[in-house]
Image (cartoon, rainbow, N blue to C red):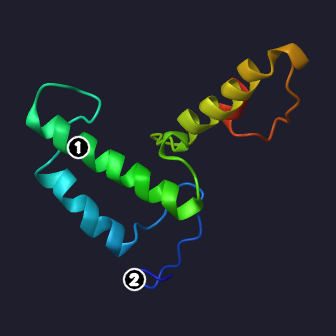
Amino acid sequence: MKDENGIVYLDNNATTQVDEMVLAEMIPFFTQHYGNPSSRYYPQAEFAKKAVEKSRLQCAKLIGAKPQEIIFTGGATESNNLAIKGYCFANSTKGKHIISSLIEHRSVLDA
């Protein structure tokens, strides 16, 4: 997709344009309801928490999963750590090494 200057952006592994429907849903959370969904005891946090749980349910339904199987992360590093370390801890009786290559993302190698 070309931007307003006619430039085509191809590095969608780093970042990508937000779909207009997603942006419309998120605007209130950037401007009015910006509470921390993991906090307690104040209205903005409760509102944000309900929105996250609604999103979790929608994502689960979309892919046929259970809501508790949906985990939202802040980015690639957190996701890679969760996946790699989670797998390793769950399978520690099968061995204690991982084979990777030097071309892996830094967050994969660091995990």
Taking the spot 70% from the left edge, 30% from the top edge, the residue there is 84
Badge number at residue 11: none
- 105 or 42: which is nearer to us? 42
Is 23 on the left-hand or right-hand side of 83? left
Residue 74 in picture, x, y percent from top left: 45, 40
Q: Is residue 99 left or right of residue 61?
A: right
Question: In this rendering, is residue 102 above or below 52?
Answer: above
Name the residue rendered at 73%, 28% in the picture.
87
SS of the residue under disc 2: loop
Q: Position of residue 69 (x, y in %)?
A: 55, 41
Residue 16 percent location from the top left of the image: 49, 63
Q: Which residue is mark 1?
A: 48
Q: Does residue 7 lie above or below 66 as drawn?
A: below
* Label 1: element kind: helix
Q: Amino acid at mark 2?
A: Asn
- Which quadrant holds the C terminus? top right
Nearest to N terminus: mark 1 or mark 2: 2
> Where is 100 relative to 95, above or below?
below
Neighbour class for label 1 at 10 Å: few (<14), some, many (≥20)?
some
Q: Quadrant of residue 101?
A: top right
Inter-mark Cα distance, 1 to 2: 36 Å
Q: Residue at x 53, y 72 (%)?
A: 9
Q: On the image, numbered disc 2 is attached to which residue?
A: 5
Q: Nearer the viewer, residue 98 or 38?
A: 38
Residue at image position (50%, 60%) is 61
- Can residue 95 be seen from the camera position used here? no
Horizontally, residue 38 falls left or right of residue 66, namely: left
Tell me: residue 40, above or below residue 17.
above
